[in-house]
């Protein structure tokens, strides 16, 4: 029997890599698209079911390759239709993936890392610490698993949009994320258009620079304050890449795309922190030169976060100020809150190498359900 470690996992490989793989096997390159159709369109899980491959090829695939995916550990459905999966990675950690059905769109929110290094003060994922990057197969595996479950149980169209807004900072796992974007876009993969894939970043400026020329998907930035002093507290990476640099590089990325593209500015509203009329005014001023849409996210609480959500009156006032300044400003509905699947509540179960989770937990011994899902 072949050792599992010698098997090459074909899940998540882009078309060109698969073509190379088949050439090495002495096969023609069109086998790559045949294989992709089996995996991504027909949902087939093993080589023996790929009936347009000869018996001999199927046997050889079994000895040299595998189709390994993250394993579903649990699936919760929210009263609003949101579905949250916890899936196990190859190294035994757990990551989260969330499906958000909304007005005809099936948006999948996927994780790019196991935990997160950035330690944003208001995000539960950051409090969990960090244990490494996901492989492309684990990123695509989340989408593939959700797509199959969706098609089988809820909607034959499967997923229609993907946002890299789950656990982790996608631009700190650049190559794997871009590799997965290639499969998401490929007609023989998920066939999603560039506008239906969004990479969201806390502000990794060099990562946005690297996107220029490499990809054309939608970009979202997690801004949360127009002031460096406040933003550095909320999003510590701001100390390295301050707001002005971030806004500038967004413009550079947009200039590599066609007309009518814009950046999404995410802004989590926290009471008394970034929700004042002055904040709205300064935000409007700051974004003047950038083609953008603003997405307001009312803060989603988690145990011992130390922040709270502003009143609905304050949230509405903030939104109106921005609309009056001429910005398309959406208020993101909070989804999946009853199953802890809302923004900033995704924690999976991370074997924390940074020991940050211990420090956070010691602030509050009754840390509650968020961290105890799987225990
Ligand atoms: N690291 C990337 C991807 C995570 S996206 C990024 O920062 O963009 C998750 C989004 O939810 C980000 O905009 C993040 O700032 C926001 N968020 C995190 N914690 C939150 C919370 N508790 N309530 C509301 N939004 C939160």
Image: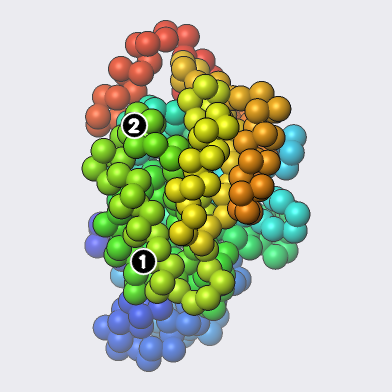
Q: Which residue is mark 1?
A: 252
Residue drawn where x is 45% and y is 48% of the image: 286
| Earlier sequence position, callout 2 versus callout 1 | 2
Rendered image quadrant of residue 319: top right
Is 340 situated above or below 110? above
The secondary element bearing badge 2 is classed as helix
Of all residues shown, which one is farthest toward the bottom? 28
Residue drawn where x is 25% and y is 29% of the image: 354
Disc 1 residue: CB within 8 Å of ligand 1: no
Question: Between 4 and 176, which is closer to the camera in this rendering?
Answer: 176
Rendered image quadrant of residue 44: bottom right
Is 125 situated above or below 38? above
- Where does residue 282 sit, x and y in percent of width and height? 48, 40
The secondary element bearing badge 1 is classed as helix
Q: Which residue is mark 2?
A: 229
In this rendering, does residue 100 appear at all?
A: no
Which coloring applies here? rainbow
């Amino acid at each position: 029997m072949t050792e599992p470690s010698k098997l090459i996992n074909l899940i998540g490989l882009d078309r060109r890599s698969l073509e190379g793989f088949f050439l090495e096997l002495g096969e023609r390159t069109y086998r790559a698209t045949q294989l992709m159709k089996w995996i991504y369109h027909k949902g087939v899980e093993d080589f023996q079911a790929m009936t347009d491959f000869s018996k001999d090829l199927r046997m050889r695939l079994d000895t040299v390759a595998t189709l390994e995916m993250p394993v579903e550990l649990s699936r919760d459905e929210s009263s609003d239709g949101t579905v949250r999966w916890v899936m196990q990675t190859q190294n035994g950690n757990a990551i989260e993936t969330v499906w958000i059905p909304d007005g005809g769109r099936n948006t999948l929110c996927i994780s790019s890392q196991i935990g997160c290094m950035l330690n944003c003060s208001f995000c539960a994922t950051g409090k969990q610490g960090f244990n490494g990057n996901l492989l492309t197969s684990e990123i695509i595996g989340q989408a593939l698993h959700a797509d199959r479950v969706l098609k089988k149980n809820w909607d034959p169209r499967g997923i229609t949009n993907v946002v890299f807004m789950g656990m982790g900072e996608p631009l700190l796992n650049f190559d794997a994320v871009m590799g997965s974007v290639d499969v998401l876009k490929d007609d023989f993969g998920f066939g999603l258009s560039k506008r239906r894939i969004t990479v969201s970043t806390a502000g990794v400026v060099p990562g946005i620079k690297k996107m220029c020329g490499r990809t054309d998907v939608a970009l979202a930035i997690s801004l949360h304050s127009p002031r460096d002093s406040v933003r550095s507290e909320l999003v510590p990476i701001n100390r390295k890449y301050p707001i002005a640099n971030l806004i500038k590089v967004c413009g550079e990325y947009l200039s590599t795309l066609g007309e009518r593209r814009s950046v999404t500015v995410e802004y989590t509203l926290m009471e008394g922190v970034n929700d004042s009329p002055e904040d709205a005014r300064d935000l409007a001023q700051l974004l003047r030169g950038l083609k953008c849409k603003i997405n307001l996210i009312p803060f989603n609480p988690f145990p011992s976060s130390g922040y709270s959500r502003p009143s609905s009156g304050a949230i509405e006032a903030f939104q109106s100020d921005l609309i009056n300044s001429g910005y398309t400003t959406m208020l993101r509905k909070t989804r999946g809150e009853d199953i802890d699947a809302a923004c900033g509540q995704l924690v999976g179960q991370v074997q924390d190498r940074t020991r940050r989770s211990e420090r956070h937990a010691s602030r509050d011994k009754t840390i509650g359900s968020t961290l105890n899902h799987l225990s």
